[in-house]
Each structure stands twice: as structure tokens, then as C-alpha cells.
């Protein structure tokens, strides 16, 4: 067996898969990847099932090393500098780390989470068919906590598959929501303020909830309701008027009014929004949200067909020495060499 060793890693990085389902009635949160499209893209590049467990890497950098044999991995999600043994690589591609080589990742750019999928998957003890980590609850495998330097993954030795790339559409724009289920706890003026304002994700946010910075949203009848169920993307408004979007490690119920719910198709985009980046919400109907979900699922199913072999971009110094890099050179003192010149 080959081993992938975590040499260095920042906070907010853990093992995540498609999520843990079937036990929310017991208060067990689903967890799972914050951006499931990126998770599926990374897994598709190395031949895993789309929602297989991978390493979710937060905004900070990380370094991994192959030991005892080659390891084939793939990256997808937030853009960031990346190299293997000083050879630059792109996000949304696969690469093989030879024994002793290091994969080095820099800070995320224009996003928050990058997914590192490992060919053959991650081995661990399933709980409700999931390895997903919820650090607060001490759940997940093989490490029920954020990853740290020295962690090791015993993995399948790399195959001889070629390096691949995947075309993942870049989506941007407003974050769409369905209003409610307690939007009647807010005046029309407050709902218009919610939809018409710029919002930013607070730096104090985490996988449980994204605190939003913007104008305070006031309640009509106070901020306490009888606790009821929540979903990924529920937007609660506590007593201070600052909305909180419930994320993958949310509780399964809550007692604050929920002014709106982020649609499933846009949840990953919101999760990837860096702290301090302004965005807006747009209200859509339930029918529109369902149509967007069908399109999103079609996109997930289309990922294997978006894969192609990565062109060899190795830099050939010997070829450079023999190449005519000057192209059509001209002489400043010989007008006959100038473009468009004709012999006298």
C-alpha cells in the first residue's frame, strides 16, 4: 500500500463525503462536503464514485507527501496555487505523486474549499454510510476531527492512468432563495431590505453556519419560535437581526425564524463565497428551485463526459535551444526586412 501523509495543513480541513443521512430525527447532522459539485468533480477525475470521501481543504494552504509508492490524486473546487515537486499543476486536474514527492497548495483564491480526491478512495469506519467529519460531535473517520500534520492515509497504489482534466462550468451571480418558512415573521419592508442589500460572509463563520454582515433584519413578533426542522441553507434571523445561513454541520432543528432558504443548486456557490465578498439574494418560486435542482443533478451526472486527457505541458529546454524563438526578425537598419516592405 502507498501512503499519503499530511505534512502541513491549515484549519477548516477534514474528510468529507456526500453526507450522513437517515438519522436527523435523532438529531444527527448530515455534515458532508460544503461544495458537492467540486467533490464530485475531483472524484470523477480519479475514477471514484461522485460522493466518495475526499479531503476538504479550507482557505489556507496544505502540503501532502507520497510515501511507500506512487499516489494518484485530483483537485477541484476553489482556485489556488498548486505544484508537485515544484511543477505547477492546475485545479480540476489529476496528477500522480511519485514516491517521496510533495503536493503543495497555497491559499485559496476566489473561493474557500478545494477537494483532494485519492484514487481508490479513503478507508475508514462508516457511520450511517458516511465518513464525514463533524468535529463538534466527534464523528467521522479515519480522523474524527480537523486534519493535522502527521495524519496518514493508507491508499491504493497509483494506476498508470494518464493525467486528466475536467471542465466544470463556472457559475456566478446572485444566490437564489425560496422565501420562508417563517417569512411572515418579517414585514414587507424587512423582506425587501433582505433581498435588496449587499451581504458578506463574516470571518467568524464555520461549517455550522455562515454569519452574514449587512443591515439588521428586525422581527415583527420577537425572535423566538417553537423549534422546528432545518435544512442546508436555512437562513435564521436571531435577536440581533444578523442572519445566519445554516451550513453542512448545522443542527437539525432551530428556534429562530427562518426568513428564507438557499436553493440546493446554489448552496455550494454560497459555501465557496470568501469572507468579505459582497453578494445578494434573489427570491425564486418553489417550482423554479426544483427546476434548478434538476439541472444541477444533470450537471453532476454529466461530469464523466466532461473529462479529457491533459496535454503534456512539460517544459523542454533542449527544444528551446534549437527553436527559432525570434520568429520573423527584422533589422532596424534594413528596410527590406520590415513588414510590408517591397524590393526597390
Image (cartoon, rainbow, N blue to C red):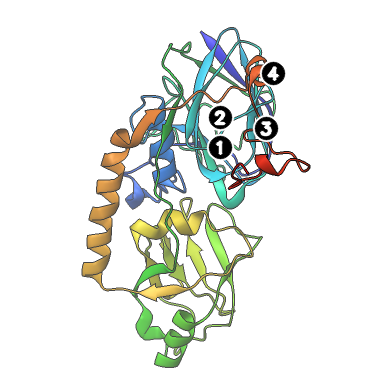
Please name the residue shown 66% across and 14% down the image: 318
Question: Which label's residue is closer to the chain start, 2 or 1?
Answer: 1
Q: Quadrant of residue 176?
A: bottom left
Residue 321, disc: 4
Q: Which residue is mark 2?
A: 143
Bin the neighbour count of mark 3 within 10 Å (Cα to Cα): few under 14, some 14-19, many 20 and up: few
Q: What is the secondary structure assignment of the residue under circle 4? A: helix
Please name the residue shown 38% across and 62% down the image: 230
Residue 149 in percent (x, y) is at 69, 28
Q: What is the secondary structure assignment of the residue under circle 3? A: loop
Residue 16 in percent (x, y) is at 47, 37
Task: Between label 4 and label 2, give the one nearer the viewer.
Answer: 4
Question: Which label's residue is closer to the chain start, 3 or 4?
Answer: 4
Q: Which residue is mark 1?
A: 14
Q: Do residues under tags 1 and 4 come within 8 Å of each other at their CB atoms?
A: no
Question: Which label's residue is closer to the chain start, 3 or 1?
Answer: 1
Please name the residue shown 68% across and 23% down the image: 150
Spatial separation of the CA atoms under disc 1 and disc 4? 46 Å
* Quadrant into which the C terminus falls: top right
Spatial separation of the CA atoms under disc 2 and disc 1? 8 Å
Bin the neighbour count of mark 4 within 10 Å (Cα to Cα): few under 14, some 14-19, many 20 and up: few
Q: Nearer the viewer, residue 199 or 329?
A: 329
Task: Between label 1 and label 4, give the one nearer the viewer.
Answer: 4
Q: What is the secondary structure assignment of the residue under circle 2? A: loop
Amino acid at each position: 500500500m502507498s501512503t499519503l501523509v499530511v505534512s502541513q495543513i491549515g484549519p477548516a480541513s477534514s474528510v468529507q463525503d456526500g453526507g450522513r443521512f437517515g438519522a436527523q430525527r435523532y438529531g444527527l447532522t448530515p455534515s458532508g462536503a460544503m461544495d458537492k459539485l467540486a467533490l464530485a468533480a475531483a472524484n470523477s477525475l480519479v475514477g471514484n464514485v461522485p460522493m466518495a470521501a475526499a479531503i476538504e481543504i479550507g482557505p489556507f494552504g496544505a502540503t501532502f507527501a507520497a510515501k511507500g509508492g506512487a499516489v494518484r490524486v485530483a483537485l477541484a473546487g476553489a482556485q489556488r496555487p498548486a505544484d508537485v515537486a515544484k511543477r505547477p499543476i492546475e485545479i480540476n486536474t489529476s496528477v500522480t505523486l511519485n514516491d517521496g514527492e510533495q503536493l503543495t497548495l497555497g491559499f485559496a483564491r476566489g473561493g474557500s474549499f478545494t477537494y483532494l480526491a485519492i484514487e481508490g478512495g479513503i478507508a475508514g469506519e462508516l457511520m450511517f454510510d458516511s465518513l464525514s467529519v463533524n468535529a463538534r460531535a466527534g464523528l467521522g473517520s479515519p480522523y474524527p476531527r480537523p486534519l493535522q500534520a502527521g495524519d496518514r492515509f493508507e491508499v491504493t497504489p497509483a494506476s498508470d492512468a494518464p493525467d486528466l482534466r475536467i471542465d466544470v462550468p463556472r457559475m456566478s451571480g446572485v444566490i437564489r432563495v425560496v422565501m420562508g418558512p417563517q417569512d411572515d415573521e418579517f414585514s414587507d419592508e424587512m423582506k425587501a431590505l433582505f433581498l435588496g442589500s449587499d451581504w458578506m460572509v463574516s470571518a467568524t463563520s464555520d461549517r455550522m453556519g455562515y454569519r452574514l454582515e449587512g443591515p439588521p433584519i428586525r422581527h415583527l413578533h420577537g425572535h423566538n419560535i417553537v423549534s422546528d426542522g432545518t435544512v442546508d441553507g436555512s437562513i435564521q434571523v436571531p435577536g440581533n437581526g444578523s442572519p445566519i445561513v445554516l451550513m453542512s454541520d448545522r443542527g437539525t432543528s432551530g428556534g429562530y425564524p427562518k426568513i428564507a432558504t438557499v436553493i440546493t443548486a446554489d448552496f455550494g456557490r454560497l459555501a465557496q463565497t470568501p469572507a468579505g465578498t459582497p453578494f445578494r439574494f434573489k427570491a425564486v418560486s418553489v417550482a423554479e428551485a426544483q427546476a434548478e435542482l434538476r439541472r444541477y443533478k444533470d450537471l453532476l451526472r454529466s461530469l464523466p463526459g466532461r473529462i479529457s486527457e491533459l496535454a503534456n505541458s512539460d517544459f523542454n529546454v533542449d527544444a528551446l535551444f534549437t527553436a527559432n524563438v525570434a520568429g520573423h526578425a527584422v533589422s532596424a537598419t534594413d528596410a527590406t526586412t520590415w513588414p510590408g516592405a517591397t524590393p526597390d
